[in-house]
Image (cartoon, rainbow, N blue to C red):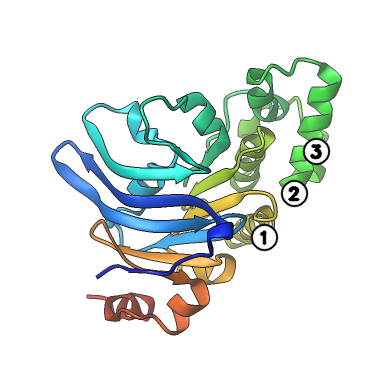
Amino acid sequence: MNKVNKIPADKVLIQVQDLSFSYGSVKAVKNITMDIARNAVTALIGPSGCGKTTFLRCFNRMHDLYTGNHYEGRVVMEGTDVLGKGVDLTELRAGTGMVFQKPTPFPMSVFDNVAYGLKLKGIRNRTELSDRVEAVLKHAALWEEVKDRLKEGASGLSGGQQQRLVIARALAVEPKVILFDEPTSALDPISTSKIEELIFQLKQEVTVIIVTHNMQQAARISDYTAFMYVGELIEFDETDVIFTNPNVKLTEEYITGRFG
């Protein structure tokens, strides 16, 4: 059933090769093979429980935080299989940032949220930290809103501001990839629009993979779209193709709301 569109080799950042993932005896992701394009937005769509988030969390091995889980296959990023035994998970997760459905600022100041990863990388000079924090907050379109509140707790920001702060925190350590797991589902339309605009701009510097239930959002901001169902990749292609001329009947039924 899988329909996989090939991305030109020079544009590929990640190669997913026959990837399966199991929670104990339950196989939640089944034999997925697809490429992820560099400096593009790839959307993962499909009904609830189809394996989108499970698939997303394979890229930074968040499943390793829990016991009884099992990967099969390979996820190759620039020649390295991130599922390999010798992979430094701290380094992997710094290079593969993640933004969750609910904003997750640390219980510290706005400044310290962004500076946290920089300090872990050994940057201690206050001037350099200040310059880097300002630059990344500007990049996340948040500086003008928080420049006079840097010493205040991040919990005092609005939901949309907190989500942009979390994105800034991820950007600070200069990742290659940022994973978004329904980053706007808890936000109002204005905040959602700001996050979407930011994601669209981010692909100039990083590769973005986003899980979304919002068909219009996927159509607006993504370059490629993967449709998943019961753990399988049903169809993957350029977003315009998926939404206007899908090759698989099940994809068409989902896109047009006639699913099930």
Q: Is residue 87 above or below residue 138?
A: above
Q: Residue at x 33, y 46 (%)?
A: 54
Helix or strand or loop: what does disc 1 sit on? Answer: helix
* Mark 3 to mark 1 CA distance (whole Å): 18 Å
Q: Is residue 82 above or below residue 260?
A: above
User: Pointer 1: what residue?
Assistant: 197
Q: Relative to residue 125, is residue 118 drawn left or right? A: left
Task: Give the numbered dot on residue 235.
Answer: none
Toward which corner of the image does residue 236 lie, by quadrant? bottom left
Q: Is residue 75 above or below residue 209?
A: above
Mark 1–mark 2 CB contact (< 8 Å): yes
Q: Is residue 201 above or below residue 236?
A: above
Task: Give the numbered dot on residue 141.
Answer: 2
Helix or strand or loop: what does disc 3 sit on? Answer: helix
The residue type indicated by label 2 comes to Ala
Label 3 neighbourhood size at 10 Å, few (<14), some (14-19), many (20+)?
A: some
Does label 2 or label 3 sit earlier along the sequence? 3
* Residue 133 rendering spot, x and y as whole percentages: 76, 32
Does label 1 or label 2 sit earlier along the sequence? 2
Q: Relative to residue 233, is residue 157 drawn left or right? A: right
Pick whichever, 13 or 146, lies toward us: 13
Q: Relative to residue 177, is residue 257 drawn left or right? A: left
* Residue 2 rendering spot, x and y as whole percentages: 29, 67
Label 1 neighbourhood size at 10 Å, few (<14), some (14-19), many (20+)?
A: some
Helix or strand or loop: what does disc 2 sit on? Answer: loop
Q: Residue at x 67, y 53 (%)?
A: 202
User: Pointer 3: what residue?
Assistant: 135
Q: Residue at x 63, y 25 (%)?
A: 117
